[in-house]
Amino acid sequence: MTLTIRRLAQSLFSLTVVMAWLAPAWAQTSANFETSVRAAMAPSIARQRSSVEKQAASVVRPHMPASARPFFVVPIAADSMPAVDCEPLSPEKLDPVVDHAAQKEGVSSDLVHAVIEEESGARPCAVSSSGAVGLMQLMPATAGEMEVQDPFDPEQNVEAGTKLLKFLLNKYDDNLPFVLGAYNAGAGRVNEEGGVPQIPETLKYVADIVRKLSRQDEKKTVTQP
């Protein structure tokens, strides 16, 4: 790839040298002749320049396969990423936020809590390598579609994440593994594979949350009179 770029650059340079060498001759000819020569060479120079730029772009910005992306991928500028060194929200602050969003969307608050714990460890400043942000790790495009003004704000983030869970619960008829697989790897992957995507990270993600919810159900059953 680097060799190709170098050759293209050398070709462009050679064309420039030829133009410079011919300049005195052009100066001695009519303006019409100069214009015609430049017009004839312009397409070739433009193609060379375009090829160099495309080759360079393919080197510095590799393409990410669509199947490897979460719901949406919209790059975040490096200087806009906040520090991730913050404390988890206390139950006193987090519980009311989760309860409000869960009641509004008709989603189990236990499910929302479990997703938050798995996604961010309840840290509102969390940022993933793919650009997902906040308590429920919203991708920027998802946050934009849900009109989230500040995805690092706990209330806005949890409300949007809970709304997304509700959408997926409806889409997959309350099939929790499918819902969690889609939240983690994207609905497209779930649809393509007809189930939880066979991605190690996603399989662990789904298993961890299902296990947490099962334990919570067991505790509730034991404590009931």
Image (cartoon, rainbow, N blue to C red):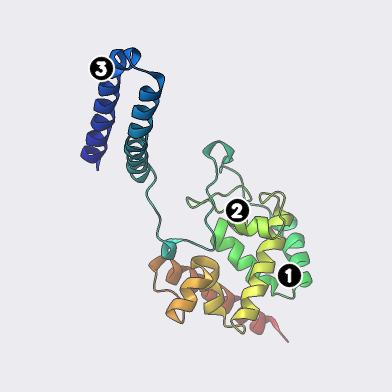
- Rendered image quadrant of residue 35: top left
**Residue type, numbered disc 1:** Ala
For the residue marked with disc 2, what is the amino acid? Pro
Side (left or right) of 41 relative to 187: left
Residue 202: where, in percent of width, then height? 45, 68
Q: Residues within 10 Å of mark 3 (few under 14, many from 20)?
A: few
Gap in angstroms between the C-alphas marked 1 and 3: 74 Å
- Can residue 207 be seen by looking at this rendering? no
Residue for point 55% across, 54% down: 132
Residue 48 in sight: yes
How crowded is the residue under tag 2: few (<14 C-alpha within 10 Å), some, or many (20+)?
many
Q: Residue at x 65, y 84 (%)?
A: 221
Q: Residues within 10 Å of mark 1 (few under 14, many from 20)?
A: many
CA gap between label 3 and label 2 equals 53 Å
Q: Residue 21 has which mark?
A: 3
Q: Which residue is mark 2?
A: 140
Asked if residue 113 lies left or right of residue 40, the reply is: right
Residue 185 horizontal/vertical position (percent) = 48, 67
| Depth check, front residue: 175 or 149 | 149
- On residue 1, which mark appears? none
- Vertical arrangement, residue 61 with respect to residue 165, above or below: above
**Mark 1 or mark 2, which has the lower sequence index?**
1
The residue indicated by pointer 1 is 102
